[in-house]
Amino acid sequence: MPSTPHPSFEDLVAEATATPTEGWDFSWFEGRATEARPSWGYAVSLAGRLAGARAVLDVQTGGGEVLDFALGRAPATPALLAATEGWPPNVAKATALLRPRGVAVVASAEDAPLPFADGTFDLVVSRHPVRPHWHEIVRVLEPGGAYFAQHVGPHSAFELVEYFLGPQSEEVRNARHPDRERADAEAAGLRIADLRAERLRMEFHDIGAVVHFLRKVVWMVPGFTVEAYEPRLRALHERIEAHGPFVAHSTRHLFDARKPEA
């Protein structure tokens, strides 16, 4: 029997550009890209932390998927639940997903002060914040409150970034280094209980997965469009077809920190 022809570059790119990018649901990548997950299992660990909390804030919740997952597995629910998000399509998605669970989703730009009073929460959480605003996190935590979060680490997926942008400076490569973030968190007044970091393998099996990833994770290649990078995309498509998946490595670190008691 004749073999089924591989989808063309044009077909793969057209499918990827037609797929919505709001939220943090990555199920579209099933069979097309993979990323190893950190050993600590953030979402499951978060479910346990929620059970012991009274008032919880999820900062930069995206489409609310991670908080929704954790709430669905938490043996008890906090009395007060709030989340912030800055991108309007994600605000709408998170509101629809989280409102039935009693979460107030507040539209708030990622670089704006958190729209809550001092000492409101005993637990602040976040998965992959663009940039942690440590003084704001400390301000809205009550004395003895905790910050529990998974951050993107330094030079994450930089094999892909540098394929399109060329070599990056050491300052850019280490902008999210956990040692730097530890120092900033401690300077703001947090005490670090645990800080773990891991480097994880990623594989992109077709050019559509690359295009959708760069459209969804917009800070990787700022201003990315298919038109602007078509020659590099075509070359990468041919490379994947000839040699197999494009391999990169993500970096993640887990923060568990506390605001000292008054």
Image (tube, helix red, strand yellow):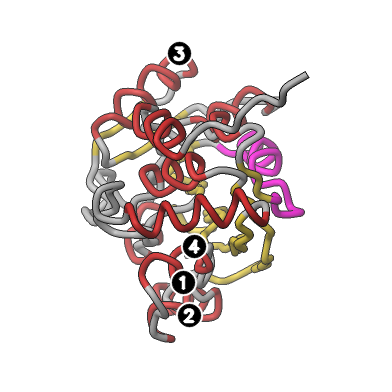
Disc with the residue nearer the chain's start (3 vs 1): 3
Disc with the residue nearer the chain's start (1 vs 4): 4
Whole-number angstrom distance, CA of label 3 to CA of label 1: 34 Å
Q: Is residue 192 above or below residue 66?
A: below
Q: Nearer the viewer, residue 66 or 74?
A: 66
Residue beneath disc 4: 160
Residue 126 visible to the viewer: yes
Label drawn at residue 130: none
Residue beneath disc 1: 176
* Circle 4 residues within 10 Å: few <14, some 14–19, many ≥20: some
Q: Is residue 175 left or right of residue 76?
A: left
Q: Nearer the viewer, mark 3 or mark 4?
A: 4
* Circle 1 residues within 10 Å: few <14, some 14–19, many ≥20: many
Magenta-highlighted residues: 36-53
* Circle 3 residues within 10 Å: few <14, some 14–19, many ≥20: few
Which residue lies at the image location 23% right of the left edge and 47% below the top edge?
109
In which quadrant of the rendered view does residue 9 lie? top left
Residue beneath disc 2: 180
Residue beneath disc 3: 100
Q: Nearer the viewer, residue 122 or 220?
A: 220
Q: Position of residue 53 (x, y in %)?
A: 58, 39
Which residue lies at the image location 49% right of the left edge and 56% below the top edge?
236
Whole-number angstrom distance, CA of label 3 to CA of label 4: 38 Å
Q: Nearer the viewer, residue 203 or 86?
A: 203
Query: Which amino acid type corresponds to the residue marked 1 in the rendered image?
Result: Arg
Q: Position of residue 215 (x, y in %)?
A: 36, 44
- Asked whether residue 71 is drawn in magenta, I would say no
Query: Which amino acid type corresponds to the residue marked 2 in the rendered image?
Result: Arg
Q: Secondary structure at mark 4?
A: helix
- Asked whether residue 45 is drawn in magenta, I would say yes
Q: Secondary structure at mark 2?
A: helix
Whole-number angstrom distance, CA of label 1 to CA of label 2: 7 Å
